[in-house]
Amino acid sequence: MDLLLKFSKVGMVFGSGGISTVRALEDINFELAKGEFLSVLGPSGCGKSTILRLAAGLESPTSGNVTYNGAPIEGPSRDRGFVFQSYNVFPWLTIRENVAFGLKDESDVNRERIASWLEFTGLSGFADAYPKTLSGGMRQRLALARTMIVEPELLLLDEPFGALDERTREGMQQLLLKAVQETGCSVIFVTHDIREAILLADQLVLLSKRPGSILSKHTIPAEKPRSREFLRSKEFTQLHETLLDQFPV
């Protein structure tokens, strides 16, 4: 598989010295191939979100290198879409206008794409409503549609389902897997939920407490989409127990 993203000996320090200095990441090394789904797992404050910000070009590492398609990342790009933990929508725009926000024009092709993503995420009946009328799960579907409609090559998700109830979260996980499968984009998904990390990923990295460094890497070859049966499999149970034992406390 073709290499898309590479972290090489990446370190990240916030602050200029003294008591305010925070060492967020230390010696982070991993590769992401095109079409691959990576879960980044770890405790709160370990630098998971910083990894996403570095991949998005919102931050630059203080040591090491982050490359995208073989070149250093120098800033944000439409090729790298970001779905935040909070419900990242524009409250003054309708659902349809939110989905269309990243598009450059109102061509017939784009109108078809807007309609397609509204239907895919189950929001067609709310197209002319405003985000305040939506539930939390529906707002995250909206955020996903607005990000995916511009066809990013890399999708970055920062604990997007953390505030959802269990059943809504399960539905969003399956919707995400379906969207990724249909578009072929690569994904980095940040979570502190071991079950979620295993369910979604092709590969998984577990981070230590801050400063975050990689404690272990795991490949998950099970076929997708993965059902509840996978969660009861020996493969899932063994990896879940391994990660539970390794998870920093």
Image (cartoon, rainbow, N blue to C red):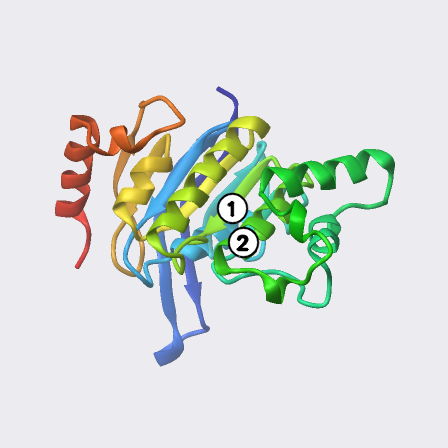
Residue holding disc 1 = 156
Given the image, on which type of amino acid does mark 1 rest?
Answer: Leu
Q: Position of residue 121 (x, y in %)?
A: 58, 42
Mark 2 belongs to which amino acid? Met
Label 1 neighbour load within 10 Å: few <14, some 14-19, many 20+: many
x and y percent of residue 59 in the render? Answer: 54, 57
Identify the residue at horizontal 50%, vertical 62% (top origin): 86
The residue under label 2 is 138
Residue 182 rendering spot, x and y as whole percentages: 56, 27
- In the image, taking residue 26 as reference, residue 34 lies left or right, namely right
Query: Is 209 situated above or below 40?
Result: below
Q: What element does badge 2 sit on?
A: helix
Q: Nearer the viewer, residue 130 or 178?
A: 130
Q: Quadrant of residue 227?
A: top left
Mark 2–mark 1 Cα distance, whole angstroms, equals: 19 Å
Q: Residue at x 45, y 72 (%)?
A: 15
User: Is 10 positioned to the left or the right of 123 in the image?
Assistant: left
Report crowding for label 2: few under 14, some 14 to 19, many 20 or more residues within 10 A (C-alpha): some
Residue 217 shows up from this direction:
yes
Query: Which circle's residue, 2 or 1, is located before the other in the chain?
Result: 2
Residue extending farthest to the bottom is 19
Q: Are marks 2 and 1 in contact (CB under 8 Å)?
A: no
Q: Is residue 134 above or below residue 65?
A: below
What is the x, y in percent for residue 6? 47, 37
Q: Pick the quarter of the image with the C terminus.
A: bottom left
SS for tag 1? strand
